[in-house]
Amino acid sequence: MAVPQERLELGAIEIHADAAGYASILTPAALALLARLHRRFEPTRQKLLQARRERQATYDAGGLPDFRADTAAIRESDWSVAPIPPALRDRRVEITGPVERKMIINALNSGAKVFMADFEDSSAPTFANQLDGQLNLRDAVNGSIDFTSPEGKHYRVGDNPAVLVVRPRGWHLHDKFFSVDGEPMSGALVDFALFVLHNARALHSRDRGPYFYLPKLEAMEEAALWDAVMADAENELQLPVGTMKATVLIETLPAAFQMHEILHALRRRAVGLNCGRWDYIFSYLKTLRGHRDRLLPERSQVQMTAPFLKAYSELLIQTCHRRGAFAMGGMAAQIPIKGDEAANEAALAKVRADKLREVQAGHDGTWVAHPALVAVAQQVFDQHMPGANQLGVLRQDVQVSREQLLAAPNGTITRAGFDNNVEVCLRYTAAWLDGLGCVPIHHLMEDAATAEIARAQLWQWLHHADGSHAEALAFPDHAPIDFALFDHALACHTHRLRDSQHPGAARADAAAALLSAMTHADVLGDFLTLPAYDQL
């Protein structure tokens, strides 16, 4: 692991970066909380990560995810989550985005009910990005956040801003800038601890949480770890147990088989589950990477109407409403298209159709990535969901089997789809290495999740297109899918990116080298952001 040159020792904590300017965030109390949380919970986190590796080994050997026999009593018995706070009872439209100062202000002013401030998939975790994000959120919570652009335009938060919900990094990510007793800290604990230390009491005094979105969980034990971490922090900050509330993203295939169990582990603080559709598709690819009969067609064809995704979303609605929790819909990745009215209207029509599907299925709210889409999504939910939510829609008609959750949809792999995967993954990785975590590409807002889909698909298509299997994975014109094609496409897109004005152009070669190595590797890497992190 590459370690930055700057190093600052503050008691048990070592900071491997230039911390000048962050003294108000990296206070003695904050550093003490970081050290306590690390020492208490890092051994459990490591055990849970090892359990992930062991589960994946069984899938690579031919096994498949399934509902757990040892937790059947949790699924079959009657229980509910704790009452949902008034501030979160209407979540019909939520906007997400990184913790950049102007974006925070625009999101809070967007008209959405909730703003999810993201330290995870839409943020590249440089030391400055993460610590500036903490400063920005502290200022947002205390009401002092503002921003003046280089052109002189002034931004400030208006009346009735969106409710703030924070997404820390997942359990799998370490933070190379913070270490305790010589061990790198969990990125999740760094994000969580710094935020709650500086904001939890103020938010609690206004009945605003703090509230969190929890990403990348794979099992109920990982949810239980979050419950224990939050309870520990509540005790440290002298807040009532259960003050901190959480919505869990069901964005991994193993978690889809443990939705009841995850809610149960967090039942005193869970307020809902979310269909994290893009990461879920990526997790399907990664989990079933060794199963040639589970390959997916190109990503543009993998829509939420596909049977395996429809089953997943309807099971989530049924599970949540049975337990008194909200079932949140997924992200609309479209962004406005300026200068082309017809193309823009076509994009908005896709957003409306997606949100109509969600509200009619019984979802209580949905996500958008751009302020211009808030009104579009809200109009659909206002028309079809006159109440604050749809907890009364129990979806008792839903019967979802293991095979339905695992069944791959039909589709094709076109030259354009293959080429798009190469371009998106390259351009996103280059931008990420340059410190940007979300990037508009071809009128879609791409983040780590969508780049991961592209990367995982390329790996699967290329590694399963060999020998007797080549014909089945050929393009419609019967041309083979092979590494020569990939290498050529990568070289072409690298040349174009290097000579462009796109974000990350200066990191094109580094991104290409990383993508080439991960695609040629014999084993599909767990996350693109893990090897990329060392290059930040």
Image (spheres, rainbow, N blue to C red):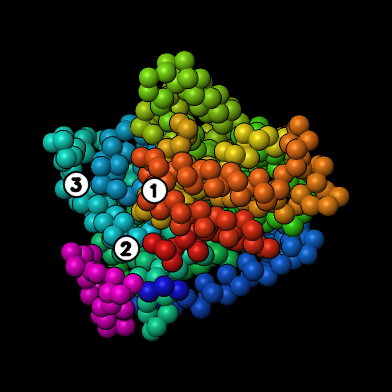
- Is residue 426 shown above or below 410? below
Residue 207 is a magenta residue: no
Q: Can the viewer see residue 146 in this picture?
A: yes
Nearer the observer, disc 3 or disc 1?
1
Q: Check the picture and name the quadrant holding the N terminus.
A: bottom left
Nearer the observer, disc 2 or disc 1?
1
Residue 25, located in which quarter of the rendered image?
bottom left
Nearer the observer, disc 3 or disc 2?
2
Residue 92, located in which quarter of the rendered image?
top left
Q: Residue furthest right?
A: 468
Residue plotted at (82% across, 42% down): 471
Mark 3 is surrounded, within 10 Å at the Cα level, by few (under 14), some (14 to 19) or many (20 or more) other residues, namely some
Mark 2 is surrounded, within 10 Å at the Cα level, by few (under 14), some (14 to 19) or many (20 or more) other residues, namely many
Q: Can the viewer see residue 445 in this picture?
A: no
Quick one: label 3 or label 2, which is nearer the N terminus?
Answer: 2
- Give the number of the disc on residue 259: none
Residue annotated with mark 2:
127
Q: Is residue 219 left or right of residue 42?
A: right
- Is residue 146 shown above or below 45? above
Residue annotated with mark 1:
504
Residue annotated with mark 3:
145
- Is residue 531 shown above or below 46? above
Q: Main secondary structure of the magenta part?
A: loop
Which amino acid, by three-letter code, is at mark 3?
Ile
